[in-house]
Amino acid sequence: MTSVSRLVVWGALATLVSGPALAQDLTFELINVSGYDLVEFYTSPVDVGNWEEDVFGSGVLPSGNSVDVTIADGRSQCAYDLRFVFDDGDILEDSADLCETGSYTIE
């Protein structure tokens, strides 16, 4: 391989390595110490104006328990709005940088 060909190959590899990162799934631990069972949980990127589907579906996160949650939305985003619906009907909404914390505790 000529030195010019090697230079072109190395340049192409450097572009691939330094290019934008591919979106990955976001996983964090959700901890419920609220005293109430969590019956619905919604997330949405902070720049989206509506809630996405209930993360739990028909599941429940009892008080005193935790679960690993994966947001597999294909976005490279860390800031999410969070909406929690408890078994007594109360609703809590908050925002968090889930990449920075790696967990979220409902108190």
Image (cartoon, rainbow, N blue to C red):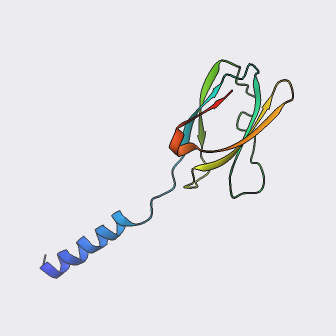
Measuring from the top left, give residue 95's x and y in whole percent: 67, 45
View extreme (bottom): residue: 4
Q: Residue furthest front?
A: 107
Of 46 and 24, which appears nearest the observer?
46
From the viewer's perspective, is residue 3 above or below residue 36? below
Q: Quadrant of residue 33?
A: top right
Q: Quadrant of the C terminus?
A: top right
**Residue at position x 52%, y 38% from top?**
102
Q: Is residue 40 above or below residue 78?
A: above
Q: Is residue 26 left or right of residue 58?
A: left
Q: Is residue 64 above or below residue 42?
A: above
Query: Could you say which is closer to the camera, residue 16 or residue 44?
Result: 44
Residue at image point 57% right, 50% down: 78
Question: Which residue lies at the image location 30% right of the left edge and 68% below the top edge?
Answer: 14
User: Which quadrant: the N terminus?
Assistant: bottom left
Q: Position of residue 24 (x, y in %)?
A: 51, 50
